[in-house]
Image: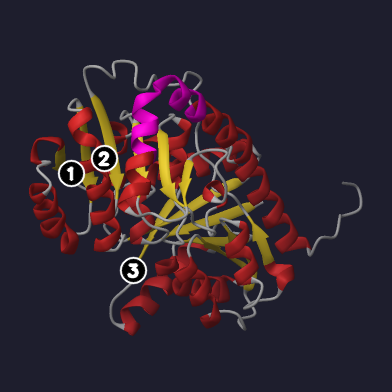
């Protein structure tokens, strides 16, 4: 079976390593793969031997249609059995493409917003599957499209054989990542206020914050007002600088965003000790098995959680190692690849088993 995997510009920017590993994982199952990348996106040399084609995801309607016709002509020579689109920015193009080459399409939904966007495609004949990254997303999707099309497909991530050490030199230096992109300013300020309550007792601790541009100025001022300038720093997008960020000891997630990504799973798998606000749309943050979960994320709650973690590094390491095991069990790349391959088979065969199999 041959699968054409299509990504949008956002997935290409933030999830390139995940996408590469997904391609490799599908190849390991015996699938054949071709890739459809947004125009201007560089190829990944690690999977350069798998064919790739370019398409135009945005622009004038006639230019997008012309781009899809060109991609369809190129793909007809290899004959994909399914098209699988990652990132809602690629969905319309994927549906147009599958209509032209006459094969079913799978759409992957990683957020509440993407689930809402399913309404635009729910009635299209080419829709063969909707793969949702969490249980809650799958439940919501089943209210929009036929539940027979919905499959919960946890994001798979690579878990290194050896765990990194965290808080091993807590008396000298501790790096905390505040992953606040997309979070409301009030939520970020709550974290800063909570950190201010414990910072005088842990001068070796520095918070590195990844924030939206609209929030950075207020957050920096808040840190100054709380006398934290020496322990608070702004950094570029964590999703584009993962290797450096994942070497930190602690991750703070200040608000529920209803959006899944490989970053949080990678952080827990590293492992990093995680403190997060409960998010019912993320299975990994539904309980405290893998992280310290806050139900009322006010400054006092953040201060209590931070103080407990920094005061007992051995307990923090044990919790982080528990999270690492959970990620390995529930979010393996192998399980993800097997599920994708099984879904493609069901899309093509309708669940029937051919004679002789």
Return the mark for residue 352: none
Q: Residues within 10 Å of mark 3 (few under 14, many from 20)?
A: many
The location of residue 330, given as percent across then percent down, is 62, 40
Instruction: Describe residue 74's horizontal placement relative to residue 81 as left or right.
Output: left
- Decide: is 97 above or below 307: below
Q: Where in the figure is residue 139, as x and y percent of width and height?
A: 65, 67
Q: CA distance from mark 1 to mark 3?
A: 31 Å
Residue drawn at x 64%, y 60% as measured from the top left: 81
Q: Are marks 1 and 2 in contact (CB under 8 Å)?
A: yes
Q: CA distance from mark 2 to mark 3?
A: 26 Å
- Name the side, left or right, on which 176 lies relative to 79: left
Q: Are marks 1 and 3 in contact (CB under 8 Å)?
A: no
- Which label's residue is closer to the chain start, 2 or 3? 3
Above or below — where is 323 with respect to 57? Answer: above
Question: Is residue 35 located in the magenta-colored stretch of the structure?
Answer: no
Give the farthest residue toward the right.
355
Which residue is label 1 attached to?
Answer: 235
Determine whether the residue tagged by mark 2 lies in a helix, strand or loop.
loop
Q: Is residue 77 left or right of residue 338?
A: left
Which segment is the magenta one? 305-320
First along the sequence among labels 1 and 2: 1
Residue at screen point 38% across, 57% down: 255
Closer mark to the observer between disc 2 and disc 3? 2
At label 1, counting other C-alpha atoms closer than 10 Å, the crowd grade (few under 14, some 14-19, many 20 or more) is: some
Task: Residue under label 3, please give it.
Answer: 56
């Amino acid at each position: 079976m041959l699968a054409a995997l299509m990504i949008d510009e956002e997935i290409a920017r933030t999830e390139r390593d995940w996408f590469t590993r997904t391609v490799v994982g599908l190849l390991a199952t015996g699938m054949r793969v071709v890739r459809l990348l947004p125009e201007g996106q560089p190829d990944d040399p690690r999977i350069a031997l798998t064919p790739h084609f370019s398409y135009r995801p945005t622009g004038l309607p006639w230019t997008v249609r012309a781009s899809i016709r060109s991609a369809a002509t190129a793909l007809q020579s290899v004959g994909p059995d399914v098209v699988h689109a990652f990132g809602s920015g690629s969905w319309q193009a994927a549906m147009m493409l599958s209509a032209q080459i006459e094969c079913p399409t799978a759409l992957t939904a990683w957020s509440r917003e993407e689930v809402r966007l399913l309404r635009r495609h729910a009635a299209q004949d080419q829709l063969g599957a909707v793969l949702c990254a969490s249980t809650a997303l799958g439940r919501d999707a089943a209210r929009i499209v036929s539940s027979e099309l919905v499959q919960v497909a946890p994001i798979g991530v690579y878990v290194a054989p050896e765990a990194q050490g965290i808080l091993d030199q807590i008396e000298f230096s501790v790096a905390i990542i505040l992953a606040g992109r997309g979070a409301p300013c009030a939520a970020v300020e709550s974290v800063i206020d909570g950190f201010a309550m414990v910072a005088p007792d842990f001068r070796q601790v520095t918070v590195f914050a990844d924030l939206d541009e609209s929030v950075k100025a207020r957050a920096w001022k808040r840190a100054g007002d709380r006398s934290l300038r020496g322990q608070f720093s702004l950094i570029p997008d964590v999703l584009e600088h993962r290797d450096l960020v994942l070497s930190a000891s602690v991750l703070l997630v200040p608000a529920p965003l209803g959006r899944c990504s490989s970053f949080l799973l990678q952080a827990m798998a590293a492992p990093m000790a995680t403190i997060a606000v409960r998010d019912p749309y993320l299975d990994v943050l539904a309980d405290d098995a893998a992280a310290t979960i806050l139900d009322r994320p006010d400054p006092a709650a953040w201060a209590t959680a931070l103080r407990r973690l920094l005061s007992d590094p051995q307990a923090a390491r044990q919790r982080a190692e528990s999270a690492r095991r959970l990620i390995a069990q529930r979010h393996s790349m192998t399980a993800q690849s097997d599920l994708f391959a099984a879904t493609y088979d069901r899309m093509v065969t309708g669940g029937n088993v051919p004679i002789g199999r």
